[in-house]
Amino acid sequence: MAADGDLGIEARGVTRRFGPVEALRGLDISVPYGQVTALVGANGAGKTTLLLILATLLAPDSGTVRIAGHDTLTRPAQARDALGWMPDTFGVYDQLTVDEYLVFFADAYGLPKQERAGRVRALLSLVHLEDHLGRPVHALSRGQKQRLGMARALVHRPRVLLLDEPASGLDPRSRIELRDLLRSLAADGVAVLVSSHILSELEEIADRVVLVDRGRTAGDHAMAELAGASARVAWRIRSLEPERLATALAGLLDGRPSMRATALPGGTEVGPLTEAEAAGLLAELVRADVPVTGLAPAGSALESAYLAMTETRR
Ligand SMILES: Nc1ncnc2c1ncn2[C@@H]1O[C@H](COP(=O)(O)OP(=O)(O)OP(=O)(O)O)[C@@H](O)[C@H]1O
């Protein structure tokens, strides 16, 4: 566990209500510097509410929030200086050009005038929007707006970065670039907190996963622990004789209700299994003379872990 001084974000016992809805019910979260932490949870779990509170845009009803060591209630300006925020929806500055938009935020953060033009150019190049200089923001596509939002969040070189669903509108290449950018920011010591429903992507980006369930923290895990050899995931098995495979699997899985076998166009999905269990299953299929031509993990380990964690609580 990281020491207090290593934490870019530290929130304790955060509650927030909207009328009768208890969006947050005593949530705790710690986000260390130098790591990407993923925030995952079902629709309505409270992720956006938490991010808005961390970004000082919404006040909690109770609890404490520290950004880069600054209490957001007593030292909001210092907290804001330390953090970059990329919301899931874009702002209301559509009439500005792409560069005017970034200059506006550079000014708002008090960037010295002589640094401004260089910083704006560097940011546009970082998010691959340099060809859009001078174009109005409203003429950008959704994904391009998201990339501009990323540049905006980084204008003042924040030590803490909050991103709400940053990959939702991005094309495949931009997603890979976002992943690389977040990894390099973490390598530079930034504390990154990113919420997303795309678990297979988070698996490649995040060092840690915080699971939010109905307004509370329901788990805090190192990705290596969830996605390592001991993680249980679904496996895809191919056979020259699918019917024989199905019969053998039905026998082998009988009496193991937590295990499923589903025939899919690309093979039969079986699981969840650890690597050792998958190897054991393969040996049994071979012993039963099933002509197996392939066995490989299917889907994402984080997805399986998420489904297992949310299942056990219902
Ligand atoms: N401004 C608001 N007024 C009323 N209720 C709200 C408001 N904002 C959020 N809520 C409620 O608070 C709960 C948490 O919402 P929140 O947007 O934080 O969830 P989320 O985890 O971000 O969900 P999603 O994955 O769908 O984006 C939901 O029940 C939602 O309906």
Image: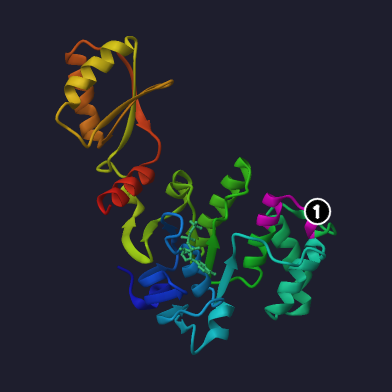
**Pointer 1 local density, CA inside 10 Å: few below 14, some 14–19, many at least 20:** some
What is the x, y in percent for residue 23?
Answer: 43, 68
Instruction: Give the magenta part as a residue range.
Output: 137-147
Task: Specify whether residue 312 is in view.
Answer: yes
Q: Residue at x 37, y 62 (%)?
A: 214
Query: On the image, numbered disc 1 is attached to which residue?
Result: 139
Picture coordinates of residue 73, whole percent (x, y): 49, 86
**Closest to the observer, 164 or 214:** 214
For residue 55, side relative to residue 149 (left or right)? left
Q: Residue furthest left?
A: 255
Quadrant of res 276: top left
Q: Identify the amino acid type marked 1.
A: Ala
Left or right? Give the position of 192 relative to 243.
Answer: right
SS under mark 1: helix
- Quadrant of the drawing holding the N terminus: bottom left
> Does 158 appear above or below 299?
below
